Image (tube, rainbow, N blue to C red):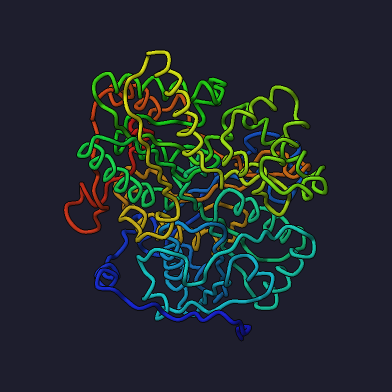
């Protein structure tokens, strides 16, 4: 198979002393996979159905809907080793720690089945599939990337393979290079795309297995079969170290309020996990704000109440955790953003003639309904400007760019000034902001993620070799020792529902939000009054890769609480 030339230089990276030592780490394979793909048989469970909108999802996926869950059992399966195959992998979406170990697991799984099997990596994400840009991933090349962070071996991208032209081009490239196993490593959108490709290839009669691998640090790709997505463990340990450091600084200086915004636009899993690890004074959870239908003013009042109470004890300091997507969970803000999306698009010509932010804000306010106009007037100038000016290529407000922590601070400062004027507050309020996001996406994977991603990749190879197309690699019982993890696959369509995207109904894998009845959130509720009033801070320190197992191999607090009754 001749590779297509591309401009990307895929050179092995230089090794630091830590990386050389980390390269010696040998991930633990679940016992069911240890003897190799030829010793694993597929056991089919009951037929499945999508989580919602069953009729609509079935209509869109007539060839892959209703497939059974799959588990692996010991048994002779030598047929997977007889004929050598070409397999390919693509990394899709944002980075997450452990991606390289997924590729390592794939390579080792395919090579264990047949040493002549080859694994190729499409470069730059799904666009590489469409353009036919790839490299062969050899054992020699892979050695430099085992147990490392990042996606730099083959890079990633956010292109979607969804139009007829894109699907046709992808099919042509897979056929041209005789790819019979195609693995998509990504989050909910990327794995929805994997489901679309699997359906298309089956419809076209192409004998190629399409397998998904669950990746996202946001933690919102999960269910009873996907207990956590890879990267969440590492990223939250990195963020927790930094938040813990801030808590220690706060407790030392005792003069600032630190507002920390954490990644996670569509769900607050990261914020909740970091809170359980560090015990800050305030943790805002978007799903709770939405459930209680809190207004922005009510969120500010909640913060003010805690600041005032601590000030009465002479404590003019604290730590507040804010999920990146908080603003979209506030019903009135979500309504405002939706109205602005339409208003900005419909009045683009008029707005382009206005020079200042103040003029544009006045124009927008004049076009909004009274309730939303009042809300827009109450927003600080900087936030109003972000809402009006930062738009994506589709004309929508880029919510992820809104500095929610600064919005909260400015409005809180105004609220405290009013309380001081009314004689209800006499403290001092000095605030510092932080945003932790990209710092955690390419970190060296924790022992948990190193083991988990390697198992996910190896498991995906076994699924592909057994021609289980349209499945997501599933490794369960994650609070147990890795050797006791359970392996198999679940149909991608099983996780789907129908949502409205860009004015059209689309099948998508449903995002898993924080469960307000779940044990992790219950722990927050149980403790937050004490955490608000006292300095109960925990200081996790740096993630440990070497040392006692109870430190190096610990799982997330989220997983520990969720699985506490399933051990």
Write down the quadrant of residue 24 in the picture: bottom left
Image coordinates for residue 316, horizontal then vertical, percent? 29, 29
Let me know if residue 57 appears in the view: no
Decide which of 110, 143 is in the foreground and name it.
Answer: 143
Percent coordinates x, y for residue 145 in the rendering: 39, 71
Work out whether residue 460 or residue 533 is closer to the camera in this orientation and state it: 533
Q: What residue lies at 73% left-to-right and 39% top-to-bottom?
A: 500
Viewport quadrant of the N terminus:
bottom right
Q: Residue at x 45, y 70 (%)?
A: 107
- Residue drawn at 51 percent across, 26 percent down: 289
Q: Is residue 103 left or right of residue 311?
A: right
Quarter residue 159 falls in: bottom right
Furthest toward the left, the residue is 548
Q: Nearer the viewer, residue 75 or 344?
A: 344
Q: Is residue 370 above or below residue 318?
A: above
Q: Is residue 186 above or below residue 283?
A: below
* Residue 357 image point, x, y percent: 66, 44
Q: Decide which of 447, 418 is in the foreground and name it.
A: 418
- Is residue 304 among what the camera can see? yes
Query: Relative to 519, is 504 above or below?
Result: below
Q: Residue at x 46, y 19 (%)?
A: 418
Percent position of residue 386, x then y: 61, 44
Q: Quadrant of the C terminus?
A: top left
Is residue 47 rendered to the left or right of residue 280?
right
């Amino acid at each position: 198979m001749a590779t297509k030339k591309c401009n990307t230089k895929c050179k092995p990276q230089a090794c630091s002393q830590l990386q050389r030592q980390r390269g010696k780490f040998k991930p633990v394979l679940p016992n069911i996979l240890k003897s190799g793909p030829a010793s694993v048989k597929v056991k089919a469970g009951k037929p499945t159905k999508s989580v919602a909108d069953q009729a609509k999802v079935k209509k869109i996926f007539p060839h892959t809907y209703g497939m059974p869950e799959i588990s692996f059992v010991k048994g002779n399966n030598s047929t997977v080793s007889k004929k050598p195959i070409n397999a390919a992998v693509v990394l899709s979406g944002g980075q997450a720690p452990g991606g390289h170990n997924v590729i390592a697991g794939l390579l080792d799984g395919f090579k264990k089945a047949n040493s002549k099997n080859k694994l190729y990596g499409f470069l730059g994400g799904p666009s590489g599939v469409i353009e036919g840009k790839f490299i062969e991933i050899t054992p020699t090349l892979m050695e430099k990337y085992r147990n490392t962070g990042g996606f730099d071996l083959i890079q990633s991208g956010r292109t979607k393979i969804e139009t007829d032209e894109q699907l046709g081009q992808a099919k042509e490239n897979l056929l041209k290079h005789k790819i019979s196993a195609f693995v998509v490593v990504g989050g909910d959108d990327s794995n929805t795309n994997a489901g679309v490709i699997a359906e298309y290839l089956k419809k076209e009669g192409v004998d190629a297995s399409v397998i998904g691998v669950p990746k996202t640090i946001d933690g919102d790709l999960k269910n009873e079969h996907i207990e956590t997505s890879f990267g969440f463990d590492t990223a939250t340990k990195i963020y927790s170290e930094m938040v813990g450091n801030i808590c220690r600084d706060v407790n030392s200086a005792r003069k600032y309020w630190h507002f920390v915004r954490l990644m996670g636009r569509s769900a607050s899993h990261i914020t909740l996990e970091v809170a359980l690890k560090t015990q800050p004074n305030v943790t805002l959870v978007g799903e709770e704000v939405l459930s209680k239908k809190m207004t922005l003013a009510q969120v500010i009042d909640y913060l003010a109440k805690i600041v005032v109470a601590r000030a009465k004890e002479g404590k003019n300091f604290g730590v507040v955790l804010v999920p990146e997507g908080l603003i979209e969970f506030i019903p009135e803000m979500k309504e405002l953003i939706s109205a602005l999306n339409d208003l900005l698009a419909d009045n683009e010509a008029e707005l382009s003639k206005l020079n200042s932010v103040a003029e544009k804000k006045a124009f927008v306010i004049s076009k909004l309904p009274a309730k939303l106009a009042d809300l827009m007037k109450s927003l600080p100038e900087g936030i109003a400007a972000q809402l009006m000016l930062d738009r994506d290529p589709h004309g929508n407000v880029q919510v992820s760019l809104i500095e929610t922590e600064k919005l909260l601070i400015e409005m809180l400062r105004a609220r405290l000034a009013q309380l001081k004027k009314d004689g209800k507050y006499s403290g001092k309020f000095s605030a510092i902001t932080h945003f932790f996001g990209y710092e955690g996406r390419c970190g060296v994977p924790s022992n948990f993620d190193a083991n988990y991603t390697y198992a996910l990749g190896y498991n995906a190879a076994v699924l592909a070799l057994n021609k289980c197309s349209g499945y997501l690699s599933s490794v369960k019982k994650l609070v147990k020792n890795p050797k006791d993890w359970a392996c198999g696959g679940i149909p991608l369509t099983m996780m789907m529902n129908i949502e409205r995207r860009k004015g059209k109904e689309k099948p998508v894998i449903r995002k898993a939000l924080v469960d307000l009845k779940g044990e992790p959130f219950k722990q927050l509720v149980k403790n937050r009054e004490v955490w608000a009033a006292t300095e109960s801070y925990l200081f996790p320190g740096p993630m440990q890769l070497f040392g006692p197992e109870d430190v190096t191999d610990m799982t997330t607090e989220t997983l520990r609480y969720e699985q506490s009754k399933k051990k």
